[in-house]
Image: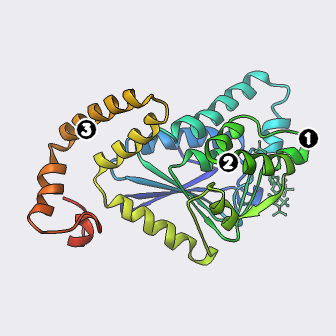
Amino acid sequence: MTYKTLDLSIADAVATVTLNRPEKRNAMNPTLHVEMTDLLEQLRYDDAVKVIVFTGAGKAFCAGMDLKEFFVELRDNPREYDRITRLAVEWRYRTLRYHPKITIAMINGYCFGGAFSFVEGCDLAIAADEATFGLSEINFKMFPGGSVSKAIANLLSPRDALWYGLTGYTFDGREAARIGLVNRSFALASLRDEAIKVARDIAGKDAVALRAAKEAFRYSLEMSGDAAMSYSSAKESEVVLRQNDAWREEGIGDFISGKYKPGLGGIEQASGGAHR
Ligand code: ACO
């Protein structure tokens, strides 16, 4: 599939996916939802990719759902409205959350409404200090619908979620970091370098361990303590099998033989390359 609304580049095991409708502030139209669904499926099976960074072309990260092409133009087409709604919820709320690759939202500018679900679905998020966030739905006589209310309930304190959900006030990247919507914020001029550095650091880790770290966290959230312990134990056996016990043989083995100190970094940093 060739994409009209997305741009993809891959380097050093990091895929960068750029929402590419700058003239519409990267609003998510039906085509974008179809294309993102397809692209996430492709990247799922791409062995050259360990981390995916999402960003936006131009001065926006994503201005939310396309208010015209989605809410207005599909009003009289309930079947297509339902189909696109399902795709839109699925890729942001479920596909990203359980995607086998590690995902990072790099918020370079405007980020409104439905884009909060996108950010929340990613494992990590890094924003420009200068980015502008807002739950703008209340400004046009709506509420944070679709997957947005659940996304903000997952990440924000009730005070912050209702503060921004009820007022529609905008806030910047520093505030997004303060309230836990993103991990960190940096000056826009250094945003890409900072995000790519984190992405490459993560890409230097063992792929099986990365996936287990993500899945153990994601699924533990949904389990009782006892079920989580049992899951974790089964997951450990899976890691041993899939890695051929490399975490013991190499990971711990190289520490015991004095090659590196895992408390201070990975073997890949000590040897200047990827973990064997
Ligand atoms: N849906 C559809 N089109 C949009 C959207 C959107 N969410 N956001 C921007 N656009 C379009 C504009 O209509 C305009 O199109 P045109 O050039 O054909 O007239 C173009 O993008 C540029 O928009 P401007 O408003 O001229 O750009 P500016 O940089 O001044 O402002 C801003 C950007 C602040 C994002 C403004 O466009 C805006 O408020 N957009 C709506 C944001 C929003 O409320 N999103 C919905 C959240 S709710 C949800 O996702 C469910």
Label 2: which residue? 157
Q: CA distance from mark 2 to mark 3?
A: 33 Å
Who is closer to the viewer here, 175 or 8? 175
Q: Disc 3 vs disc 1: which is toward the camera?
A: 3
Q: Using the numbered discs, state the Cα–Cα distance from disc 3 to disc 1 in whole angstroms.
A: 49 Å
Image height of 127 relative to 19, above or below: below
Q: Secondary structure at mark 2?
A: loop
**Circle 3 SS class:** helix
Instruction: Give x and y (percent) for residue 144.
Output: 77, 40
Q: Quadrant of ligand 1?
A: bottom right
Mark 1 to mark 2 CA distance (whole Å): 23 Å
Q: Residue at x 38, y 32 (%)?
A: 228
**Kind of residue at badge 3:** Glu
Mark 1, other Cα within 10 Å: few <14 / some 14–19 / many ≥20: few
Residue located farthest toward the left when viewing the structure as drawn: 257
On the image, numbered disc 1 is attached to which residue?
Answer: 141
**Which circle, 2 or 3, is nearer the viewer?**
2
Q: Quadrant of the C terminus?
A: bottom left
Q: Which residue is mark 3?
A: 236
Name above or below for residue 16 compared with residue 188: above
Residue type of the residue flagged with mark 1: Lys
Q: Residue at x 83, y 43 (%)?
A: 68
**246 w.r.t. 200: above or below:** above
* Label 2 environment density (alpha carbons within 10 Å; few <14, some 14–19, many ≥20): some
Tell me where residue 36 appears, x and y as whole percent. Answer: 57, 43
Q: Is residue 238 above or below residue 60?
A: above
Question: Mark 3: few, some, or many residues within 10 Å (few <14, many ≥20)?
Answer: some
Q: Is residue 266 left or right of residue 26?
A: left
Q: Are marks 3 and 1 in contact (CB under 8 Å)?
A: no
